[in-house]
Image: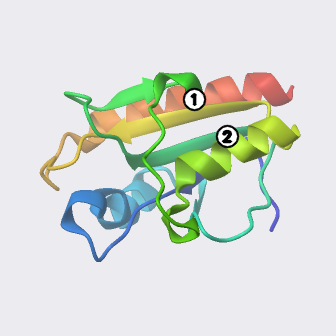
Amino acid sequence: MHTTARTVFVFGNPDLSEDALPMHLLPHLQRMLSDVSFVTLDPNEEWDVPEHMVVLDTVVNVPEITTVTDLDAFMAAPRMTCHDFDAYANLMLLKKLGAIQRVTIVGIPPGTAESTDIARLVEHLRAALEDAHAFHS
């Protein structure tokens, strides 16, 4: 997979209503950001990613669309079995291995209406992509 500083990695589970919004908004975002490549990732698969990832995901305990640039701001989910491996754990592993240097996560609170202010979400994504572009330059 070829990725650039104009790539947004999208996490979400369309089968879980509290985690499906990023996937449901994807067609709107693709129209509004036609110069951006959107790549959906499964946390349980191997990822081929750039040194600075821009991620769109559902983020618990944020009151509104939020941009997070520090993985340490998140709490690790409790893990009981190897089946509980999640996106956060994969990002932390990639960071520890040096495969990624930076991650910018644009987070949408669970329960956000699908009619959310898409323009605001696009602003957050554009700012994250500009930061990623500057990092790669």
The residue lying furthest to the front in this view is: 80
Choose the circle earlier in sequence order: 1 or 2.
Answer: 1
Q: What residue type is labelled 2?
A: Met
Specify the label residue 24 is tagged with: none
Q: In this view, does 88 lie above or below 12?
A: above
For the residues labelled 1 and 2, say whether their Cβ atoms are less than 8 Å apart: yes
Q: Where is residue 54 drawn, in percent x and y? A: 60, 41
Report the residue marked by disc 1: 71
- Graded by Cα atoms within 10 Å as few (under 14), some (14 to 19) or many (20 or more), the crowding at tag 1 reads some
Q: Where is residue 40 drawn, in percent x and y? A: 55, 66
Going 42% across and 60% down the picture, which residue do you hit?
A: 31
**Observer able to see residue 29:** yes
Going 74% across and 67% down the picture, which residue do you hit?
A: 46
Where is residue 18, by image quadrant? bottom left
Q: In this view, does 131 lie above or below 89?
A: above
Going 65% across and 23% down the picture, which residue do you hit?
A: 131
Report the residue marked by disc 2: 92
Left/right of residue 92 with respect to residue 31 in the rendered view: right
* Quarter that holds the N terminus: bottom right
Going 36% across and 57% down the picture, which residue do you hit?
A: 22
Q: Is residue 121 above or below residue 64?
A: below
**Tag 2 secondary structure:** helix
Q: Distance between the residues labelled 1 and 2?
A: 7 Å
Nearest the viewer among 54 and 79 is 79
Q: Which amino acid does label 1 sit on?
A: Leu
**Tag 1 secondary structure:** helix
- Graded by Cα atoms within 10 Å as few (under 14), some (14 to 19) or many (20 or more), the crowding at tag 2 reads some
